[in-house]
Image: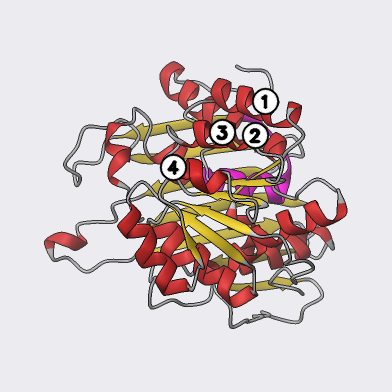
Amino acid sequence: MIPDQPVRHREFGIGAVGAGFIMADVQLDAYARAGFPVRAIASRTVSNASEVAKRWAIPTVHSSVEELLADPSVEILDVAYPPHLQPDVIRAALRHDHIRGILAQKPLALNLADATALVDEVEAAGKVLSVNQNMRYDQSIRVLKQLISAGDLGDIVTASVDMRAVPHWQPFLRDYDRLTIANMSVHHLDALRFLFGEPADVYTAVRPDPRTDFAHTDGIVASVLRFENGVLATSIEDVWGGPIKEGAEGDVAIRWRVEGTRGLATGTLGWPDFPEGSPSTLRYSTLDSNGWVSPSWDTQWFPDAFAGVMEQLQYALATGTPPELSARDNLRTMALIEACYRSIDERRAVSPQQGG
């Protein structure tokens, strides 16, 4: 079992756009550990970019994104901007020949139509666009995928993801009409696609969360997915996890479970206690295992999985092969998100492949 993606290539120079939490505290940490060369950084606030550059020994701080895009040392553009700003940054990068690859955040855009148009433009320009679906590189999810692929669990029958944890909410999300599904459920929906293929349909129910202080619709989310191969899966996101802040004891965790005809596996994702950090966990029992088996590893989803995300893009550029996290594939995750929102509006199961 291989919980982490080995680094096969690390030569392409990276230009970081953004100096917020996910870039400053997670991605750049992962890149430093893996030895990826970050050549330059720019952000909307130059002082923030300068502080992050000093922290991670990045040699060049640019005063604007446009200046960074023109830097010939930047071969991979790593964008960590809000989704309403991200497409324009990517489009601007298409004008620069030295930029060969682009790593974007999820969601790629605010809706499927805008994301599809963006991917079409990137492909027409001959660039390689990848989307940072980092849960696919969580150690427990990768080992689970290996168990499934080897047939150790047999034919998969049911699966579940249950999130009771408070994410690092960015302030700009308050202004969007889409909250939890597009910005948090997207992790779980994409991971379920990674594990089981394409959903035939999804039924999603939501309610506002009274424990937060701004208007929203999809605060707490419950989705039921039926996959083309017969798997029945659920994904639940309770992203305020209260009433912890009011003084009650909490139960903060992200748990998953997969059951098949020959075995079952359960696990946790080790992100909720960041920055202290703990590895994700997995245990499984099969007809051949003679009891429970609990593999372990020292690496963590945050930050180590993000090295795998950058590695797959580095490797794709070095070999001329599509990245594992291709933008074209990510449009299927975006289509699933759209199906969730349509399911809420129409109160029925919706097919992401057929648009309803």
Residue 276 screen position, x and y as percent: 38, 78
Q: In which quarter of the image is residue 356?
A: top right
Q: Do the residues labelled 2 and 4 touch (CB within 8 Å)?
A: no
Q: Which is more foreground, mark 1 or mark 4?
A: 1
Q: Is residue 294 magenta?
A: no
Nearer to the camera, 69 or 134? 69
Ranked by sequence position, the earlier of labels 1 and 4 is 1
Q: Disc 1 and disc 4: Cα gap in Å?
A: 24 Å
- Name the kind of residue labelled 2 in the image: Leu
Q: Do the residues labelled 1 and 2 touch (CB within 8 Å)?
A: yes
Res 351 seen here: no
Packing grade of label 4 (10 A; few <14, some 14-19, many >=20) is some
The secondary structure that most of the magenta stretch takes on is helix
**Residue on which the image places disc 3:** 92
Provide the residue designation for mark 4: 183
Q: Is residue 27 left or right of residue 356?
A: left
Residue 132 x %, y %: 59, 50
- Determine which of the numbered discs, if any, sits on residue 94 in the image: 2
Q: How much space separates mark 2 and mark 3, taking CA atoms?
A: 5 Å
Q: Nearer the viewer, residue 290 or 218?
A: 218
User: For the residue marked with disc 3, what is the amino acid?
Assistant: Ala
Q: Is residue 310 above or below residue 356?
A: below
Measured from the top left, where is residue 51 in percent x and y? Answer: 35, 66
The residue under label 4 is which amino acid type?
Answer: Asn
Query: Is residue 171 among what the camera can see?
Result: yes
The residue singled out by tag 1 in the image is 121
Q: Nearer the viewer, mark 4 or mark 3?
A: 3
Part of the protein shown in magenta: 186-201
